[in-house]
Image (tube, rainbow, N blue to C red):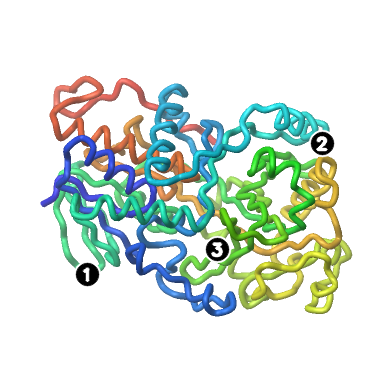
Amino acid sequence: MPDVIIIGAGPAGIFAAMTLLDRGISDILLLERGSDIEKRRCPARENNGHCLHCTPCSILTGWGGAGAFSDGKLTLTTEVGGFLGELVPKSELEKLIRMADQRFMDYGAPAEIYGGSTRETRRIKALAKRAEMALVEMEVRHLGTENCYQVLKRIRKDLEGRLEIRTETQVKSIRVKDGTVKGVETEDGEFISAKFVVSAPGRVGADWMRGESRRLGLAAIPSPVDIGLRVELPAAVLEELTSATYESKLIYYSKTFDDKVRTFCMNPYGEVVTEYTGDIMTVNGHSYAEKKTDNTNFALLVSTIFTEPFDDPIAYGRYISRLANLLGKGVIVQRLGDLLNGRRSTPDRIAHSSVRPTLESATPGDLSFVLPYRYLKDITEMLEAMNQIAPGVNSRHTLLYGVEVKFYSHRIEVDRNMETRIKNLFVVGDGAGITRGLIQASASGILAGEAISEGLSGKTKGKKSGSGRLVREYRCPLPTD
């Protein structure tokens, strides 16, 4: 019977474990569905880009979570990356972000920081305003895909022997009795008892977390579903933006539908890659610290909130993804000029493009058969707006890959320590719908680790009620629709 069970070895779970260890608590069992980091291999990278539909996907699961093979952008701001700013004061969140960032640096993250409030970013921000967009000023530390993997390897090595880690172990359910968590049951039928449980299943575990929250009666609200395309163009087109900010977070509200459209995961001199979640394939992007291509890629995502009568954004995102997979036998690529002219892209037309696709396995096709007109209109409007600050973005040769979908779980109600209404059950990270990136996911793990360590040592942050249940001094109410 360990003191603490942590479900998921992504950043949220890892940082919860490290925080507990820092405070002298070592009776920890960390359970991870995927493989250990040394065993994580993606056959697609050795198979000319062709996904073999591994279950579970080694890109998304395993020690380090989906972030292990990301390009490792640490967005050092309270403004993006999650909702922790609604749970703790801004000053405390800033401190948590600095703590998480320093931990990454301790394990080898580079010292260089991009962006921030510089003369160049202020100039770009002014240009964005003229084009009816907002640029989020933020500092970014870029690890690079290969360095992110190495940082997580060092963390794994440092934790060896300090806690129990079980990989390739999938949790079936969280066990609760009389309003208090009792442990977990694995898919193999093993029941493991614990005083505290931290659920950190990551974005790939969002569907499972949603099912568990419903079964356990945890209050939650639907999160927006982010659906869109990945854009690829010559790196020179965005050089002024990426050299100043590395990742430009641009936000635009479409003229036709007033939908929120945003850039996401910008990868200077990077490559477009695939992800496999369950039975669907989606598209993503990476950039390396050393290896460079001639292109830059980024996602354009449209956020939609479903309320009544339909409130299942994950199901909708999966439906759109399956449609793309059906028509393109995977990922579809199309030239922007072909899309605007109402015709499909063919291998010959792609070959005539001045932009060479970095995802060679993508199938030339027609994305208008996949995405609703509303989403396509939103995206093409933003490309026009971006063209005003970076001429060449709206070129007929610009490549569009589809689809890109970000699956976020329903946002589960927690207090400022990440504890749910079930005593001693904490949920953290992207899989709980609370964060959307490496830094805030890590910060949420720190919060949970600190609260549990205080609980195990008999300390509290609030006052005890008559029943002995901790009454928090600060609790963020659920926002209304």
Q: Quadrant of residue 195?
A: top left
Check the image and report above or below for 224 versus 231: above
Q: Residues within 10 Å of mark 1 (few under 14, many from 20)?
A: few
Disc with the residue nearer the chain's start (3 vs 2)? 2
Disc with the residue nearer the chain's start (3 vs 1)? 1
Q: Amino acid at mark 2?
A: Ala
Q: Tell me the element at label 3.
A: helix
Q: CA distance from mark 3 to mark 1?
A: 27 Å
Mark nearer the viewer, 3 or 1: 1
Q: Is residue 405 left or right of residue 173?
A: right
Q: Outermost residue, left direction?
A: 1
Check the image and report above or below for 375 versus 15: below
Residue drawn at x 69%, y 70% is: 332
Q: Quadrant of residue 324?
A: bottom right
Q: Position of residue 396 (x, y in %)?
A: 86, 60
Residue 68: numbered disc? none
Q: How many marks?
A: 3
Q: Position of residue 378 (x, y in %)?
A: 75, 49
Disc with the residue nearer the chain's start (1 vs 2)? 2
Q: Quadrant of residue 288?
A: bottom right
Q: Position of residue 270 (x, y in %)?
A: 64, 58
Check the image and report above or below for 284 versus 480: below
Q: Residues within 10 Å of mark 3 (few under 14, many from 20)?
A: many
Q: Position of residue 235 (x, y in %)?
A: 74, 54
- Residue that label 1 marks: 188
**Looking at the image, do the residues carrying marks 3 and 1 touch, with CB atoms under 8 Å apart?**
no
Q: Amino acid at mark 1?
A: Asp
Q: Amino acid at mark 3?
A: Arg
- Residue that label 2 marks: 131
- Residue that label 3 marks: 318
